[in-house]
Image (tube, rainbow, N blue to C red):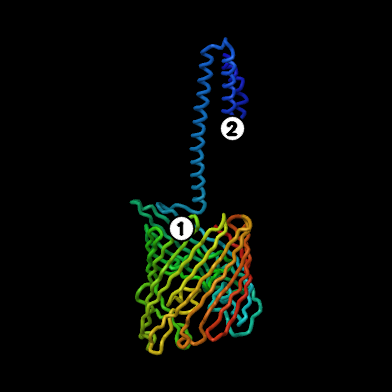
Amino acid sequence: MLLSATILSASPAWAQNNDVDARLDRLEALVSGLIERMDAKDQASASDVATAEQARQAISETRALAERTSAVEGKIAEQAAVTQKEDANGFNVGKTRVTYGGYVKLDVITERTSGGQVPSNSIARDFLIPGAIPVGGEASGFDTDFSARQTRFFLKTETDVGDDHKIGSHIELDFMVTDGGNERVSNSFAPRVRQAYITFDNWLFGQTWSTFQDVSALPEAMDFIGPTPGTVFDRQPMIRYTNGGLQIALEQPETTITTPTGARIVAGDDSLPDMVVRYNHTGDFGHLTAAAIGRVLRVNEDDFGLINDSSIGYGISLSGKLNIGERDDFRFMATAGEGLGRYIGLNIVNDAAVRADGSLSPIATYSGFAAYRHFWTEKWRSTISGSYFKADNPVLLTTGLVTDESWNVFGNLVYSPVAPLDIGIEYMYAKRQTEDGASGNLQKIQMSAKYKF
């Protein structure tokens, strides 16, 4: 009776407390106090003591049940959160899951060139193209352009085909380097295919970043690319096989040639694909990548008269991203080879030059970049970067008008008031010099706002 009365008297206060653990702690304390008082009194019956012990055991079992229930509820809530996140940017069509993403970006660019004027509406005013920096002319003033052309959108699919197979696709569009409206009225630009590929288990079929390029090593930049003179940069159709860190790919061949007048020829006579072998090593430190490429450069006399030859191109590239401290990182790339012209810095020089007898002389190139990113706070960060390109042109075959070297440096400050939004400002200085000694530089201030979704 004493036990029943005590529990009943405590029940109103217990019911008013919404925290299960707190209520169990309080009830357990009450029962323990009862047992102590009954032990101290000779008149306490054995049945009362037994009942109190049973109550304490029931409380212990209830607590264990509450803990298991809480764990289950936590897992359900976690799964619901994941499902909600997936549903936020995707939907199902039969057995196919469709997801989407991308970003909207506004760029405001003010730039000046020392060696000549870059024409209005030229893509060379949208982002750095090292081979297009004017040389030998009169300096321009500072020209300002607003652009939203870098905005991009992608769709991904994954279809449940059973039998432990995985099949998916990726389609990505943006509006860079395409024809369209003008700055006077519409600023309308046609969309273009950036990436379009199929994945099936370990295989990829379609257009994406060249396996020779380590995209994840590129530093954060307001410019479309950033360390352009020193980086491998190419998207093209391919067939790629991946097994762990190893990748092997057969990719689109295309030979670019410099004629004795300095003109560029895109032969289109290639018959064998470019072959790339790459290995990625990842860990808590970041990642390291080594890639090698082999190419057959080819041009046929049925298109260009006396020019009829093929030659071997090859190269290696080492790159990576190294974590420094909790959030900072260091990124780098170093590339060297012969006949790599179209892969480096947006085709700064060509793959080969034409000898007097019509044979091809592959052009050697050396390039690289380094970049350091530092987080000042959770919302503020900066990147500084420098890159360099050097070509070993056979000047007697190419004339002195081709690019000998190019380099750039840039630094930026980025503010992210909320995770999906970046607002930044960047200063860049770039220079190009030709084999005859003519040079020109570019100075650019760029402000950007980007919303990722």
Task: Answer whether residue 305 is visible to the viewer in this image.
Answer: no
Position of the C terminus, as image quadrant, is bottom right
Residue at mark 1 = 282
28 lies left or right of 205 = right
Name which residue type carries label 1: Thr
Occupied quadrant, residue 2 = top right
Q: Which of the marked residues, 2 or 1, is nearer the chain's N terminus?
A: 2
Name which residue type carries label 2: Asp
Secondary structure, mark 1, is strand
Image point 49% across, 51% down: which residue? 86
Disc assigned to residue 19: 2
Secondary structure, mark 2, is loop
Q: Percent x, y for residue 80? A: 50, 44
- 381 is higher (above) or lower (below) than 439: above
Farthest right residue?
A: 141
Task: Answer whether residue 42 is visible to the viewer in this image.
Answer: yes
Farthest top residue?
A: 43
Mark 1 neighbour density, 10 Å: few (under 14) some (14–19) many (20 or more): some
Q: Percent x, y for residue 206? A: 40, 65
Occupied quadrant, residue 27 = top right
